[in-house]
Image: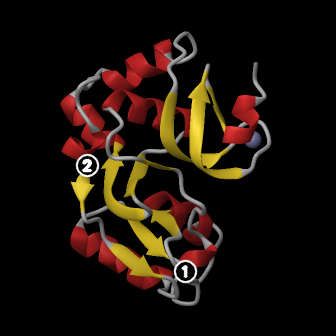
Amino acid sequence: MKEIKVEEVMTRNPIIIEKGLNIKDAADLMRRERIGSLIVRLTGNEYGIITERDIIYKVVAEGLDPVLTKVESVMTYPIISISPNLNLEDAANIMWKHRIRRLPVISNGIIIGILTENDIIRLSPGLIEVTREVFEQTQPLVSGVRGYCDKCRKYDENLIYKAGKYYCQECFLKLE
Ligand SMILES: [Zn+2]
């Protein structure tokens, strides 16, 4: 799986919605397109993501009105994303680490695709499990990931992975 790149497996041109859309319309769109998540465009190149789970847990279970609730109030933001040239093993690591099942793929600040856990399982049914088992013992160095630094909790556009944790550039340089 080391040789297979994210861009070869991801779904290209994922559906991107604008903020302001209500949950009912978002759910309707998911049903029509048979997808489990939608990317939400904010200002500029900022994005959020809303999933079926967000709708179930944060809207339905809370008793919120899906017509009155906007996507941006329940979406996940900022998103954790990956670059298209990472391999599937790296992607599986990142999903496991963050307990997420979908990763938007960003190239030059633009979302070009989305990779789901199902995409990986379809190609390599054992990879997610194997990844969970070996995760703590391996120490690969991976970059091209956006998310929160495990040390200072700051959001960073290019996290560096080492020994089971993600670091911003600043914290990574202070490691040794
Ligand atoms: Zn940091």
Rendering colour mode: secondary structure
Which residue is located at x 74 percent, y 40 percent?
170
Give the mark nearest the N terminus, 2 or 1. Answer: 2
**Viewer-proximal residue among 45 and 97:** 45
Residue 65 lies in quadrant: bottom right
The x, y position of residue 35, in whole percent, is 29, 62
Amino acid on which the number 1 mark rests in the picture: Thr
Which residue is located at x 40 percent, y 60 percent?
108
Horizontally, residue 127 falls left or right of residue 42, namely left
The x, y position of residue 59, in whole percent, is 58, 71
* Residue 168 seen anywhere in this rendered image of the structure: no
Residue 139 lies in quadrant: top right
The x, y position of residue 40, in whole percent, is 46, 73
| Separation of marks 2 and 1 at Cα, in angstroms | 24 Å
| 90 to 79, vertically: above or below | above
**Quadrant where the image shows the C terminus:** top right
- Which label sits in the foreground, 2 or 1? 1
Query: Does the numbered disc 2 mark a residue whose Cβ is under 8 Å from ligand 1?
Result: no
Look at mark 2 in the image and give the residue it sits on. 10
Mark 1 Cα shell of 10 Å, populated few (<14), some (14-19), many (≥20): few
Which residue is located at x 43 percent, y 21 percent?
131
Horizontally, residue 123 falls left or right of residue 41, namely left
The x, y position of residue 12, in whole percent, is 23, 59
Amino acid on which the number 2 mark rests in the picture: Met
Look at mark 1 in the image and give the residue it sits on. 43
Quarter holding ligand 1: top right
Query: Does the numbered disc 1 mark a residue whose Cβ is under 8 Å from ligand 1?
Result: no
| 126 to 110, vertically: above or below | above
**Viewer-proximal residue among 30 and 61:** 30
The dot on residue 12 is: none
